[in-house]
Image (tube, rainbow, N blue to C red):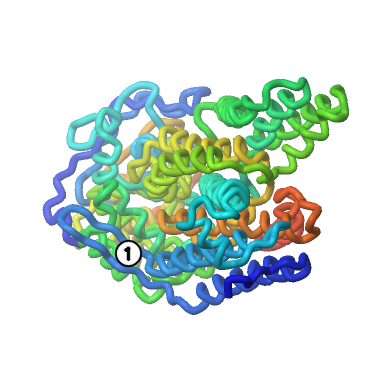
Amino acid sequence: MHYLAITTPTLQRSLTVLAGIALTIFLIRLADHIQPRHHTFRWQNISSRIQLRVVWLSLGATIAIIVLSGIGLIVGDYPIPATKAIATALWERNGEYDFIINSLRFPRIVVAILAGMCFASSGLIFQSLINNPLVSPDIIGINSGAAVLAVAILAIGGNTEHLPWAAFLGALLTAGLIYLLSWRKGISPTRLVLVGIGINSVLGAIITYITIKYPIERVVAAARWQAGTLFGARWDDARTLAIGLLILLPAAFFLTNRLKILQLGDETAITVGSKIERDRLALLSVASLLAALAVSVVGPLGFVALIVPQAARLLVGSITGGVLIFTALLGGFFLLGADLIAQRLFAPVMLPAGVITATFGGPYFLYLLARYNRAN
Amino acid sequence: MQTNPNNTTTFSGQDLHLSYGGPMIVEGLTVTIPTQEITAIIGPNGCGKSTLLKALARILIPAQGKVEVNDINIHSQPTKEIARQLGLLPQNPRSPDAITVSDLIRRGRYPHQSIFRQWSSDDETSVDMALSLTGLTNFSERPIDELSGGQRQRVWIAMLLAQETPIMLLDEPTTHLDIAHQIEVLDLLKELAKRNNRTIVMVLHDLNLAVRYADNLVAMRDGKIKTAGKPNNVVTAQMIHEVFSIEAQILQDPVTGSPLCIPMMKST
């Protein structure tokens, strides 16, 4: 039992890919089987309407994440018996596998989950606020903003310790710039997207310029960072993401009620008592911070913020606080799965996770585009 | 519905100067809306009737003058407070993708909710009542995209009802509807005004429907009120000419006895 080690690359590859597929099917089946019911919670002045289906599906997503994490601990270039791997991660300290499990694999798993949660919840807020499923922080230039400063630091050979801060700052400055340039007696969501797409292409040009101008060996590091990779993820990164999420996710959760009102259009929103510009700014800030946080740690991983909210919406419907939490969990599951597959698919060659998310994301985006155009 | 058995909420606009940043569309307009009655604003295209309604609904901030509910300026009160007094159905309301009927109507309860009080028994009662008054109870879990234009308009009216405001404003609630649905929507509003003591203000394009359903007419032209009062008193051939620049004969509506405007053709 102790030696249930999954050693051959083929076996590891099959296990990760099959687990990813099986768990995805598990979530879809779960969604099909649970009827949409709600539970009304009332106690004194506190009341809430809880979508039971979303609660069950969130539980399902949590289980999927746990199973996938277990597999992530077991597979890798260095064979470790399954029971030993899990024991070392959870309770057995200072064992012979301590370094591989607790310094390499486990933090990377946690970072993948948390970064996926950030991207997905950010994407859901952007898509719901702008009322367009084709919008996400990577498309309106927030990721590129992070990339410009990060690539600049790598290209001039600056201190890489400052890289996360530069990326974070770049993302936020870009978000602020988009907001200011879209302002004309208020923010129109359509204008925001158009300005964002414009800024995205300008930033893309700047990045290209930097990569052409600077020596090739530094530029390679920049290219690697830009693809979005979880290689070398540390507990420090996990802690940064966890602290950020602990603040931002509850904030986003409580803002979803205001988001639901903004979705009705400015005129209706004003007359049911929404302070539209204040609420919109709050939501854009939280969504931008979530994206900036994730990008600063794992790089501009594309498509997670675009696809996951879409998939979540197909499963559970339009945004509520519960849907936000479910979407975040689904994002964690997706990025963790993508990263494991990226590591194992061509092992020992490791792909950046961004390659996998883009491989799945590109075709899916085209599919959405086609479907969305037909619906309109 | 349970609220306002005695709706005494007063509503008026005083010395309103309105523009969208360019030229003044409405200049120095004063209007008092009678309580618990239906008031229809009529007038030719571009006369400023929708602009006036937007100002009354506080979407448009007056360049000068003020709108008062219970003698207090609506822009000096907390926004949720006003949202419990005054609701609007805009001309082209926007529904989020794939939203269900009950989900949309529930959002009308926003001004009655807070961060912890998100779904009180009052909210539930109001939404159920709004569904049944508009005949939508059996449609409550259907996506709005699947409904007909008339049904969709009823959903928006239901959302406005769930907001439980003594004053309801509607910007052309019958546009894009066929004659049967127009009558259906207006009958519903008439009943609400009568049975639930709501004060209703609407912009209507169809003069004869306005005359039939409104207790008061406000006829506008060039940003000014030409005349206002009971349809029986104000609808004359001369008034029609002054407001719409057309010749018309005024007959008696065989159904209601109210005035019926028959426009003349140029060639006759």
Q: Residue at x 30, y 30 (%)?
A: B75
Q: Is residue A131 visible?
A: no
Nearer to the camera, B115 or B133:
B115
Q: Look at the numbered disc 1 and give the secondary structure of its residue.
A: helix
Residue B112: horizontal and vertical position, in percent?
25, 49
Does any portion of residue A334 appear in the rendered image? yes
Q: On screen, A13 above or below A243?
A: below
Spot the residue most to the bottom. A33
Task: Assign the C terminus of chain A to one quadrant of the image.
Answer: bottom right
Picture quarter containing residue A179?
A: top right
Q: Is residue A13 above or below residue A269?
A: below
Residue wearing tag 1: B188
Residue that protrudes farthest toward the left in the picture: B6
Residue A196 locus on image (x, y percent) = 65, 35
Left or right of residue A250, residue B94 in this image: right
| Amino acid at pointer 1 | Leu
* Position in image of residue B171 (x %, y %): 42, 48
At 66% across and 37% down in the image, what residue appears? A143
Q: Pick the quarter of the image with the N terminus of chain A.
A: bottom right
Q: Nearer the viewer, residue B65 or A95?
A: A95
Q: Nearer the viewer, residue A44 or A374?
A: A44
Q: Quadrant of residue A291?
A: top right
Residue drawn where x is 55% and y is 67% of the image: A83
